[in-house]
Image: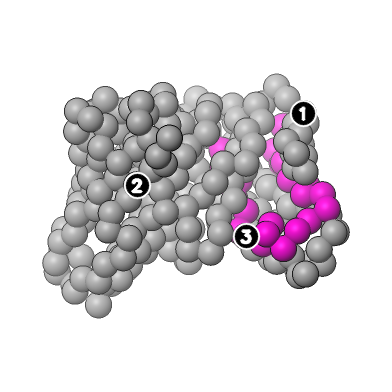
Amino acid sequence: KAGVTQTPRYLIKTRGQQVTLSCSPISGHRSVSWYQQTPGQGLQFLFEYFSETQRNKGNFPGRFSGRQFSNSRSEMNVSTLELGDSALYLCASSLLAGGVSWELFFGEGSRLTVL
Amino acid sequence: SQQGEEDPQALSIQEGENATMNCSYKTSINNLQWYRQNSGRGLVHLILIRSNEREKHSGRLRVTLDTSKKSSSLLITASRAADTASYFCATDTQGGSEKLVFGKGMKLTVNP
């Protein structure tokens, strides 16, 4: 069974630009969560989508948004990029919603560098 | 915001030795999970322990949970060079929103 696929794996943007990251969950998984990982802040929860609905949102500004499609694939978008948005963005899928009572399956991440 | 905090932040041992990592958290939980991350890669789930469990085993891994002390430990026995990675504990918050909150992680280096 294919794992969680994130694209692109690496990207470089400049301040003020916007970026869209994609995540394809494991087949049959309906929940997709996004995390931002930086050396200073560690893993920070961005949001979770389940059946195309945002179930949970972390403490990030409105520049960070996401969506989920009917096939459970998810995208996240960051507008007006800032230097501090440089991070590894991780997507995780799970069969059911919440992810607190069962394991999350992570993708390899998208490493974003903002110059 | 971090719920869990791993200790020590870094540990270096020789192959064959045991490695113990600790996690402390602040509020009551339903479950606690441990994950491993190889450098710059995605996280891999290791084990989940529920709040009504005290100990759980999986291969060379042993996890304990002490809810009265709000702490958990992960023991890796007979470590191998391939165990070199960062290890994270993750918790939910009882009565809180259903999201998993990760600690900042602990770097384990196993020297061959």
Residue at image point 32% right, 60% down: A9
Residue indicated by mark 2: A5
Say which label, 1 or 3, has the lower sequence index.
1
Residue at image point 77% right, 49% down: B76
Residue indicated by mark 3: B85
Q: Crowdedness of circle 2 by 10 Å Cα count: few (<14), some, many (20+)?
A: many
The span shown in magenta is B66-91
Residue A55 position, x and y percent, is 31, 30
Q: In this view, does A39 lie to the left or right of A9?
A: right
Q: Is residue A3 left or right of residue B81?
A: left
Same-subunit check for callouts 2 and 3: no
The kind of residue tagged 2 is Thr
Q: Residue A97 appears in which quarter of the rendering?
A: top left
Quadrant location, the C terminus of chain A: bottom left
- Chain bearing mark 2: A
**Foreground: disc 2 or disc 3:** 2
Find the distance from the CA under tag 1 to the CA under tag 2: 35 Å
The kind of residue tagged 1 is Arg
Looking at this view, is B25 or A105 the one in front? A105
Quadrant location, the N terminus of chain A: top left
- Chain bearing mark 1: B
Residue indicated by mark 1: B54
Q: Crowdedness of circle 3 by 10 Å Cα count: few (<14), some, many (20+)?
A: some
Q: In the orientation shown, which residue stands out farthest toward the right?
A: B17
